[in-house]
Amino acid sequence: MARPRTPAGRARRVHELLKDEYDAVCELDHRSPFELLVATILSAQCTDKRVNLTTPALFRRFPDAAALAGAEPDELEEIVHPTGFYRSKARNLQTMARRLVEEHDGEVPTSLADLVKLAGVGRKTANVIRSVAFGLPGLPVDTHVTRLAKRLGICDEEDPVKIELALNPMVPQQERGDFSLRLILHGRRVCSARKPACEACVLNSFCPSAFAAV
């Protein structure tokens, strides 16, 4: 098979090959858009594994936006403490929940514009919620997506928003979230930051960085 010569061609080939490698699954445990929103806020500078160990107790105590909005700050901080930066995360969670109650009847909104107005929610988190919880177009760009897009010669930008806007036209609208999830999984399991396992990578036949010091 011919090597793709353009960034768009490489993105399409990556998308095709990773479909056979990974189910497009978000590794944050959740049962609703609200739970995913909370978990994603907690995942900032924290592993999904640690978040998944923390959220069951959190959701038992505060199962919805109204309950979280009325939480005692000290109790909330104690529960989310294991995820790090617990004071700011607890504050963001409560401020976010109050806005959901006051402006959205306690429900998580679907629009990007509304989501990024919530405390603790940037464009990446908003795109996670849109694509995973609602099945809407959204391409979250995290450190894995940034790293792999550069290594694969798809995009050289450093700014996550610029990367998202560059990748969007290369992927079918409804598959953007899945593309991001598969890049993230590949980045975690094969194309790691310090020691990529190029010999085990299904993309090594056309990756410009394969077997190079990166």
Image (cartoon, rainbow, N blue to C red):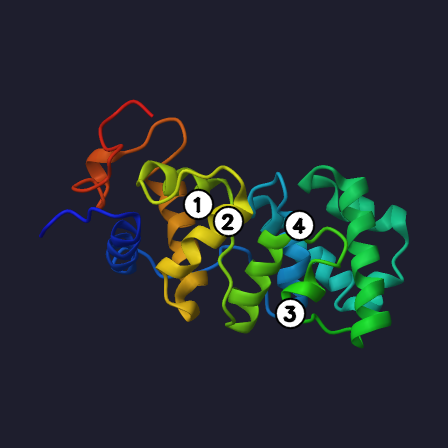
- The kind of secondary structure element at disc 2 is loop
Q: Residues within 10 Å of mark 4 (few under 14, many from 20)?
A: some
The residue located at (73%, 74%) in the rendering is 107
Q: Which circle's residue, 2 or 4, is located before the other in the chain?
A: 4
In the image, is residue 182 above or below residue 107?
A: above
Q: CA distance from mark 3 to mark 1?
A: 22 Å
Q: Which residue is mark 1?
A: 145
Residue at 59% over, 63% down: 129
Tag 1's secondary structure?
helix
Which residue position is annotated with label 3?
A: 111
Label for residue 54? Answer: 4
Q: Nearer the viewer, mark 3 or mark 1?
A: 3
Separation of marks 1 and 2 at Cα, in angstroms: 5 Å
User: Is 7 left, or right, of 112 in this rendering?
Assistant: left
Residue 122 image point, x, y percent? 66, 51
Mark 3 packing: few (<14 Cα in 10 Å), some, or many (20+)?
Answer: few
Say whether marks 3 and 4 touch (CB < 8 Å). no
Residue 82, image quadrant: top right
Tag 4: residue type?
Answer: Thr
In the depicted structure, whether residue 155 falls above or below residue 100: above
Q: Nearer the viewer, mark 3 or mark 4?
A: 3
The residue that disc 2 covers is 141
Q: Judging from the image, what secondary structure is the residue with disc 4 in?
A: helix
Real-space Cα separation, disc 3 to disc 2, in angstroms? 17 Å
Mark 4 to mark 1 CA distance (whole Å): 25 Å
Residue 143 in the image: x percent, y percent?
49, 40
Disc on the earlier residue, 3 or 2 = 3
Q: Is residue 192 left or right of residue 134?
A: left
CB contact under 8 Å: marks 3 and 1: no
Residues under numbered marks 1 and 2 in contact, where contact means CB atoms less than 8 Å apart: yes
- Quadrant where the C terminus sits is top left
